Image (cartoon, rainbow, N blue to C red):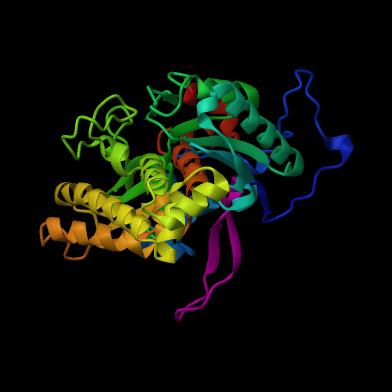
Amino acid sequence: MIRVVPKAELPLPPASERQTPSDGLLRLPVVEASSLRGGVLADDSLIDVLASIRDGAQSRPDVHARTGLGRGVVAQRVRDLLDRGLVTDREVGPSTGGRPPRQLRFNADVGRLLVAFVGATSLDVAITDVTGAIIEQHAEESDVASGPAPILERIEELFDELLTRHRTARLWGIGIGIPGPVEFDTGRPVAPPIMPGWDRYPIRPRLTERYGVPVWVDNDANVMALGEWRHGVAQGHNNVIFVKIGSGIGAGLISDGLLHRGAQGSAGDVGHVQVTDDAAILCRCGNRGCLEAIVGGTALAREGERAAREGRSPWLADVLRRTGTITARDLSDGGSYGDQTSIELLQTCGTLVGKMLASMVNFFNPSLIVLGGGVANAGDLLLASTRQAIYGRSLPLATRTLEVRTSELGDLAGLLGAATMVLDELLSRELLPRWLETGDPSAIAREANR
């Protein structure tokens, strides 16, 4: 299935203004950066002011209250950001007794991002503004097991098409989410169980060389966690566990307002927690009894097909007869229909995931758990059994204010999270000072992707 969702069409420059590089690589045209230059280095106060505006501060008094910086410092740093084009000063806001404040906004149109989210059986790409808002999105079926060359070639084709249609701002960076462990510092997959041929593949250097901008790569659960935290139900929560239940199972951890990746980038790989001693259940990682091997989407589909062939589920048997296969989505539909086998499989999934999460709740003490991914679309059946296991096995103090919810972003979480990842890195204390004076993040591409 392919869908294209144009959200905001931007005009293509006249043919006379389009660039056709001799090397044949599609790039955005160079734009004047004078409005992004200035004489003040990006010190901590400027970075703090920019972060507060990005997080929702709408006026100078609001920035002052959020950052604790002096009013004079705030005024100067806002001027610096206005001069660089990173912030806009819009219509007058409501008065609170004095002069009505001007409303500050992070300038969404100062740049563009390209993002891709690679699933086991799907591929989503988008171009966004620099707030992460999607301008245009494209989704299609794909098989990650076909290897990195065809998948990345397709991503590049789609990126080029998006750039051709939306060339009015400079490309700032690229973000990619993939369904396997990623060494974040290098952007390379490391022994991904469902991604044959991808081990240590140089995704970041390949895309950096082609597009000339910084590139970041992370695993799918981390990227979706960022999407939920910045744009979804996790907004306002600083300690969050996002659990992706799809073909595989993984978690993204927001700790004190920051994504926790661990020492090498493998934090949250909960799908390979052992939940049974049954030696017959072999996981794709090579171990036995892993959570993912028992109730991941692939495992659920396998059990559903077995039930259909054995005649234990007329509903699934009919699906198998019509389509030739059973998917986790079929189980979700079967649960809604009232098929007892589908209900039991989904409840087993929720219970085992909930037991695993109870241990994480006792250890990590989050305020929110978000269930996402294809299997999580099963709705209340899965949510209820997961909640029951969590609350039944966690300490009372740890669950006093704990919420357990399903994602409301669905498939968009990965794309929004990939954009958030790029922006968080570009606007970080480490990288922002390296490109702010020129207004061109591509200047740090080689260093950022070393």
Q: In the figure, is residue 45 to the left or right of 282?
A: right
279 sits left or right of 53 in the view: left
Establish if 421 lies above or below 103. Answer: above
Residue 102 covered by magenta stretch: yes
Q: Position of residue 409 (x, y in %)?
A: 48, 57
* Residue nearer the viewer, 375 or 155: 375
Judging depth in this view, the residue of 211 and 78 nearest the camera is 211
Residue 305 x/y as whole percent:
42, 44
**Is residue 11 shown to the viewer in this render?**
yes
Measuring 31% from the left and 31% from the top, which residue is drawn there?
A: 266
Residue drawn at (48%, 45%) of the image: 414
Residue extending farthest right: 16
Asked whether 193 falls inside the magenta stretch, the response is: no
Where does the magenta region start and end?
A: 80-107
Task: Determine if residue 52 is in view.
Answer: no
Write down the quadrant of residue 185 in the picture. top left
Q: Position of residue 78 (x, y in %)?
A: 51, 53
Q: Give the number of marks.
A: 0
Left or right: where 270 falls relative to 308: left
Measuring from the top left, give residue 340's x and y in whole percent.
Answer: 34, 60
* Placement of 18 over or under 367, stated as above or below: above
274 or 50, which lies in front? 274
Instruction: Answer with the quarter of the image where residue 32 lies.
Output: top right
Task: Return the residue found at the far front.
Answer: 311
